[in-house]
Image (tube, rainbow, N blue to C red):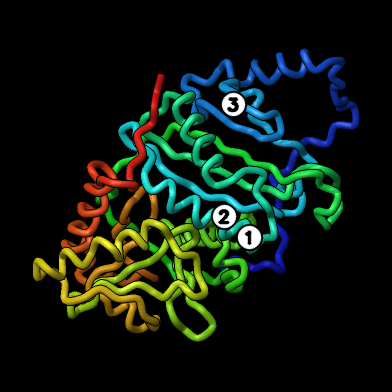
């Protein structure tokens, strides 16, 4: 269990009174030092970044920085979202942008651009990156300006985006999870995808310390909430797909899409029903199958929870049928789900 009253102890370092901090004489000297760091990297993990601060796209990793006085950095006043690039297509970008701007509204951050312009920037950024498979993360910040608590001193908000080269694939192996002892976020902060992720980080660290992959939050009333950065879904013993309601947790875009696609399995007689409803901890642990739902997974089978097997302790058949349904939608989906990237 993570105990917030016990301070984390950093690794000891040698106490050298003779240590001297180098003062860079020029920006060119500093840039040369930054380039030294990246020159040893075999493959550039971040092929392109956009920043409204310098008003364009950079392909130079040494320049992929944001100002220290940006309120997202020192006050956590920022929101973000993530989309994926798969086979040269952006999947569900518009859905993620909708949620992104809703989060910004809750955080009282106005975008420096319209939604259509943000969309255009992201598509152009992906094209410039030449990345065909990976993730795309983007942020709206109150912006740089000063180190005050209020953002009144920030001349304008800031938009940042980066392409991350990530060779993800459909998850087929089951994982172990725990019930998190780290307090979950209150609804105001849980329903907006903001950059304050310390509870999420601590809950994952707690799980890893116990030999698990990740964790599950249970609310104060004893109902299932969500994972640290994913939604949670269950197949009941009656073959019903159920998810917790999204009133007090983040409304996952992939979870939303799963709820749209899953009725096909009801029509095929594989599922009895699809629903969002409150699920008690006892009901959840009695489920036949359990899974995480998230953008790059798209489903991650859960086979053990708090050292107890879920169902028969193996990857569920219906979990994989649902995973295939989502993966096929990501690879071959039509309409606005997949946006082709105009690579040059």
> Is the C-beta separation of discs 2 and 1 under 8 Å?
yes
- Structural crowding at the residue carrying mark 1, measured as other residues with C-alpha within 10 Å and reported as few (<14), some (14–19) or many (≥20): some
Residue at 21% x, 76% y is: 273
Distance, label 2 to label 3, CA atoms, is 21 Å
What is the secondary structure assignment of the residue under circle 2? helix
- Around disc 3, counting alpha carbons within 10 Å, would you say few (fewer than 14), some (14 to 19), or many (20 or more)? many
Q: Horizontal placement of 197 versus 303: left or right? A: right
Q: How far apart in space, not on screen, are marks 1 and 3 (Cα)?
A: 26 Å
Residue beneath the point at 21% across and 54% down: 325
Q: Quadrant of residue 191?
A: bottom right
Q: Is residue 148 visible?
A: yes
Quarter-of-image position of residue 39: top right
- Residue 324 screen position, x and y as percent: 20, 52
Q: Residues within 10 Å of mark 2 (few under 14, many from 20)?
A: many
Q: Element at badge 3?
A: strand
Between 163 and 169, the one lying in front of the other is: 163
Query: Residue 322 lies in what quarter of the image?
Result: bottom left
* The C terminus - image quarter: top left
Left or right of 96, for residue 109? right
- Measure the alpha-carbon separation of dots 2 and 1: 6 Å
Q: Which residue occupies 36% across, 62% down?
A: 256
- Mark nearer the N terminus (2 vs 3): 3
Residue plotted at (19% across, 69% down)? 312
Q: Which residue is mark 2?
A: 101
Q: Nearer the viewer, residue 33 or 147?
A: 147
| Extreme residue toward the right, this view | 17
Residue 211 visible within the image: no
**Residue under numbered circle 1:** 105
Looking at the rendered image, the disc whose residue lies closer to the viewer, 1 or 3, is 1
Helix or strand or loop: what does disc 1 sit on? helix
List the residue tagged with mark 3: 57
Rendering coords of residue 21 (x, y %): 86, 26
């Amino acid at each position: 269990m993570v105990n917030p009253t016990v301070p984390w102890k950093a690794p000891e370092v040698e106490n050298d009174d003779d240590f001297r901090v180098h003062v860079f004489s020029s920006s060119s000297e500093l840039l040369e030092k930054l380039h030294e760091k990246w020159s040893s990297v075999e493959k550039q993990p971040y092929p392109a970044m956009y920043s409204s601060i310098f008003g364009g796209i950079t392909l130079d990793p040494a320049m992929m920085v944001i100002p220290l006085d940006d309120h997202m950095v020192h006050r956590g006043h920022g929101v973000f979202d993530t989309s994926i690039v798969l086979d040269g297509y952006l999947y569900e970008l518009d859905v993620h942008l909708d949620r992104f701007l809703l989060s910004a509204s809750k955080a009282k951050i106005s975008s420096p651009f319209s939604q259509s312009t943000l969309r255009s920037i992201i598509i152009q950024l992906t094209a410039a990156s030449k990345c065909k498979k990976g993730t795309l993360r983007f942020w709206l910040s109150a912006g740089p300006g000063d180190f005050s608590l209020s953002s009144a001193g920030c001349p304008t908000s800031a938009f940042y985006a980066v392409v991350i080269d990530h060779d993800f694939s459909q998850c087929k192996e089951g994982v172990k999870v725990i019930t998190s002892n780290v307090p979950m976020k209150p609804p105001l902060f849980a329903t907006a995808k903001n950059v304050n992720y310390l509870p999420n980080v601590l809950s994952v660290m707690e799980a890893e310390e116990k030999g698990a992959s990740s964790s599950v939050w249970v609310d104060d009333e004893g109902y299932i909430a969500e994972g640290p950065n994913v939604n949670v879904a269950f197949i009941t013993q009656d073959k019903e797909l159920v998810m917790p309601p999204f009133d007090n947790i983040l409304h996952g875009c992939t979870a939303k899409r799963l709820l749209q696609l899953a009725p096909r399995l009801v029509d095929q007689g594989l599922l009895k029903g699809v629903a969002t409803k409150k699920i008690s901890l006892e009901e959840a642990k009695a489920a036949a199958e359990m899974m995480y739902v998230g953008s790059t997974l798209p489903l991650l089978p859960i086979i053990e929870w708090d050292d107890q097997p879920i169902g028969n302790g193996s990857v569920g058949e219906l979990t994989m049928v649902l995973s295939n349904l989502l993966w096929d939608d990501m690879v071959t989906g039509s309409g606005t789900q997949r946006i082709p990237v105009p690579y040059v």
